């Protein structure tokens, strides 16, 4: 029988879905390096013509995210040479007297606040080295603290416009939604989820939050100043990183994108604080496994987008809800939460934004109306909270896992989902209650 172009068009979506499922299975089973797996999946999408090379590089790969990651990795690495993270680790540990529950709560709340004011990727890059240093000093497992950092980075990032990439994307598509709008509507639910999650994690990790008294006694004898290896480099690093953080906070007013701010910070620090050998060390310190993992993952998910699967999911959502706003908000919340756990929430939200806009247009909703905004808040909550479901649900998750491996500690995909899935379900249920009592009752 003669092979036709239409046959390829009909078969292509199923090939794309097969490649995605196979890639995901290999990531979950951890039989091969995750970067090699996603790069193989991405190249397969290109080889079979499921994604065009031009679209892959211009639309699907989030180069802004990649630039931000590489720049922050280099800055953190250079700063670490000065001993600043060991210094902060000892200082924080001494302030809490090495009491594990206090440390757990401090890092959880600090991660939440940092992710809301900066962004969750930057926050975890700054906090994880400190946690690893403290746990080495105390000879304790960092697992509960690293899991908490992942979870609270996504929960805290939900609270503001700049905290999590999905929020930035939603805000960019809706100029009428200001920084204050995100704060007023999403901070309360973020705080609710933080408190519920803290309680749940305490119950889960209660037995692991134990540090022998003799270790805590030894800790109190340490002097954090002894851990500063290069005072000049530390001062320069703190100045540049401080300016970079200010740039993150003011990037909207300055009309400079966050990745550009991060790149400027990395270049400034290399130019001012290190020699040619140090620059080579900084480049070598980049977690290239993580970077290539993201590049491959963006292309694999792009294959689903280009072959209609994400659009089919969005259309199904509209068919199920029948245009009912309260039901639509709930379905968007839960579908976004589940989908963002399976695929990275950045490409998912990029696909959902035009869908929600089209839904509003079909229903005749004013773009700035309460009904329309409820859909946007539901999308933001589902995408951010769903990122906690698996290790590939959010950029911050992958970064923490990569930093943990470099620090000599590893945890598996399975280890994470045992905690991540229950927290995601509890978080989404809490968000559902919030949506109902704050918005749906008023509609």
Image (tube, grey):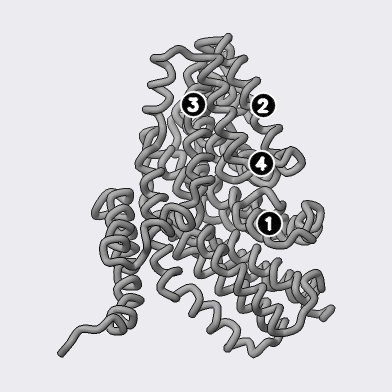
Q: Which of marks 3 and 1 is nearer the N terminus?
A: 1
Q: Is residue 5 visible?
A: yes
- Give the side of residue 337 with respect to residue 438, left or right: left
Please state the horizontal and vertical placement of residue 214, each as a whole percent of the image. 49, 25
> The residue tagged with tag 4: helix, strand or loop?
loop
Quadrant of residue 100 within the rendered picture: top right
Q: Earlier in the sequence, mark 3 or mark 2?
A: 3
Mark 4 → mark 2, Cα distance in angstroms = 12 Å
Kindly report which numbered mark, 3 or 1, lies closer to the viewer in this rendering.
1
Quadrant of residue 283 within the rendered picture: top left
Q: Earlier in the sequence, mark 1 or mark 2?
A: 1
Whether tag 3 and tag 2 are in contact, CB under 8 A, the answer is no
> The residue tagged with tag 1: helix, strand or loop?
helix
Residue for badge 4? 118
Residue for badge 3? 215
Please state the horizontal and vertical placement of residue 318, each as a whole percent of the image. 60, 84
């Amino acid at each position: 029988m003669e092979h036709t172009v239409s046959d390829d068009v009909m078969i292509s979506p199923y090939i794309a879905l097969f490649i995605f499922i196979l890639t995901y299975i290999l990531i979950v089973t951890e039989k091969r390096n995750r970067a090699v797996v996603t790069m193989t999946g991405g190249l397969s999408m290109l080889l079979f013509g499921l994604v065009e090379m031009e679209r892959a590089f211009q639309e699907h790969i989030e180069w802004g995210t990649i630039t931000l990651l590489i720049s922050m990795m280099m800055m953190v690495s250079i700063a670490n040479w000065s001993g600043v993270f060991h210094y902060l680790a000892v200082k924080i540990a001494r302030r809490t007297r090495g009491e594990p529950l206090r440390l757990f709560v401090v890092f959880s709340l600090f991660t939440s606040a940092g992710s809301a004011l900066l962004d969750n990727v930057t926050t975890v890059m700054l906090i994880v080295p400190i946690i690893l240093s403290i746990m080495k000093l105390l000879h304790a497992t960092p697992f509960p603290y690293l899991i908490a950092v992942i979870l609270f980075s996504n929960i805290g990032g939900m609270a503001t416009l700049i905290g999590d990439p999905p929020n930035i994307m939603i805000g960019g598509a809706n100029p009428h939604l200001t920084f204050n709008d995100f704060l007023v509507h999403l901070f309360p639910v973020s705080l609710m989820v933080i408190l519920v999650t803290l309680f749940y994690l305490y119950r889960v990790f209660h037995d692991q939050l134990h540090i022998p008294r003799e270790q805590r006694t030894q800790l109190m004898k340490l002097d954090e100043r002894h851990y500063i290896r290069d005072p000049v480099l530390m001062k320069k690093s703190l100045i540049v990183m401080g300016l970079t953080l200010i740039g993150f906070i003011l990037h909207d007013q300055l009309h400079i994108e966050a990745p550009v701010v991060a790149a400027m910070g990395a270049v400034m620090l290399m130019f001012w604080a290190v020699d040619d050998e140090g620059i080579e060390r900084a480049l070598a310190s980049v977690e290239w496994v993580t970077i290539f993992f993201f590049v491959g993952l963006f292309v694999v998910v792009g294959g689903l987008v280009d072959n209609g699967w994400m659009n089919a999911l969005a259309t199904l959502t509209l068919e199920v809800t029948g245009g009912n706003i309260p039901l639509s908000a709930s379905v968007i919340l839960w579908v976004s939460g589940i989908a963002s756990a399976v695929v990275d929430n950045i490409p998912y939200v990029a696909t959902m934004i035009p869908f929600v806009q089209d839904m509003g247009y079909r229903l005749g909703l004013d773009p700035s109306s309460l009904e329309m905004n409820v859909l946007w808040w539901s999308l933001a909550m589902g995408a951010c909270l769903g990122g906690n479901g698996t290790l590939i649900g959010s950029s911050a998750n992958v970064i923490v896992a990569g930093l943990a491996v470099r620090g000599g500690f590893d945890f598996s995909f399975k280890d994470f989902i045992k905690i991540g899935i229950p927290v995601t379900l509890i978080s989404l249920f809490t968000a559902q209650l919030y949506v109902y009592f704050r918005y749906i009752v008023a509609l």
